[in-house]
Image: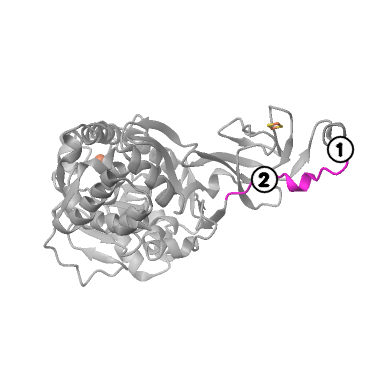
Amino acid sequence: MARIQSKGVSQRLQELLEGLERGLEEGLIPAGIFNDPELFELEASRIFSRSWVYLAHVSEIPSPGDYVLRYILNNAFIVVRSEDGKIRAFLDMCRHRGMRVCRAEMGNASHFRCPFHGWTYRNDGSLVGVPAEREAFGEGFRKEDWGLLPIPRLEEWDGLVFGNLDPEASSLEEWLGEIRWYLELVTKRSPMGLEVLGPPQRFVVNTDWKLALETFISDSYHTLMTHRSMIELGIAPKDAKYAMYGEQIHIPGKGHGTMVVGAPPGAKLPPFWGYPEEMMERARTSYPTRQQWEVARETRIFLVTLFPNFSLHNPIRKPDPQYPVPVPMLTFRVWHPLGPGRIEIISWGMVERDAPEWFKEKARLSYLRFFGSSGTFEQDDTEIWSHVAQNAASTLGRKVRLNYQMGRNLKPDPNWPGPGVAYPINFTDENLRNFYRKYLDMIQG
Ligand code: FES
Ligand code: FE
């Protein structure tokens, strides 16, 4: 931790981070990391300014001129498909005096005209119009020097578009590493790939981004209490420990993690998440490897979380107890940090592009019922996360060390066919320990 001290981090924050580092060994993590203004500043500069952050799916901007506004920290970026078909991203800030040039969250535009003095940019970022150019700026003015500023790095992997504020960052592929094998269980379920089920839902929650991430990277254990009502209503499987049955896998050195949950013993759940037969058949040949198909066939609930703030969740769900067959749903989400103890959840419903239309509609409804701002599971979770964050900022609460000891004595599963380090039960904090190792690594550097 000496490096942190040398870079002007306060004594208090240094102690907090030392507590976290020690806690990883003991399974005791200081609550104070979950709602701290000074730590948030450090996370902004050391983590979010140097990580690949999910921005958009290619299906959100299929045609030239399509754009969406997306964010890394408090920077707004226009992610746009230019006339040449290439996806680009620009800081939404006029080069003249700094006004936002894009006034909608999504749309289609060949040009962006600044509402302040009217400078006009093509959707490839080039400045093409300056009112009264000659009178105001004279002969020597070079418009080519004043285009919109591109995001330092922009890369796409299998339809997922990420940005990075660090021009020196290693490639997205390198950043993802072996978690790609698991992402492909979703992105390659069909040769046509995925599409969004409309624009994202966005809502603000008074919590820390790490608390949201923790649930989606590791915490199967909360389902038996937080989502108890779903079990009582017959929406989740009868066995209250249903989320325990599966493997928890992390990618060492990367911070990413996944949970691959099968059917509880004796439960009659259809294979392959309950997707329609035709989709299952397509997947059998679409997956790059036989092992991926075999894992997918046995999967009923699936989560992948990428360091630092992207998660996908793909569970089998019965929209209501009367509904005859389960309908799997897929959501992508970004835990967008707004400040200490405050996030915006940006949540998309996703589906295979070539899924039958009836299924797309059912999957959309299934997503809306369970996730998004009106979703039952989402409301259960966010209510709890906000109170943990509140406690974490209280004068006594911030000093409390929380229990991260679940599954400490587990041994990895030597027979798991996929990459990463797998544990044969989901009731473990192993993915969190891996996440916080990466977190400390970046916070220190
Ligand atoms: Fe955009 Fe002046 S700030 S034209
Ligand atoms: Fe939950």
Tell me which numbered mark, 2 or 1, is placed earlier along the sequence.
2
Q: Nearer the viewer, mark 2 or mark 1?
A: 1
* Residue plotted at (23% across, 38% down): 235
Is the residue at mark 1 in contact range of ligand 1, meaning its CB lies under 8 Å from it?
no
Is the residue at mark 2 in contact range of ligand 1, meaning its CB lies under 8 Å from it?
no
- Which image quarter holds the C terminus? bottom left
User: Which residue type does callout 2 highlight?
Assistant: Pro
Q: Position of residue 346 (x, y in %)?
A: 42, 38
Any mark on residue 138, and which? 1
Callout 1 environment at 10 Å: few (<14), some (14 to 19), or many (20+)? few
* SS at mark 2 in the image: loop
- Taking 309 as reference, is 319 above or below it? above
Q: Would you say 318 lies left or right of 141 here?
A: left
* Residue plotted at (78% across, 41% down): 128
| Structural distance between the alpha carbons of marks 2 and 1 | 33 Å
Look at the numbered discs 2 and 1 and tell me whether their residues touch, using CB distance below 8 Å. no
Q: Position of residue 378 (x, y in %)?
A: 30, 35
Q: Which residue is mark 2?
A: 64
* SS at mark 1 in the image: loop
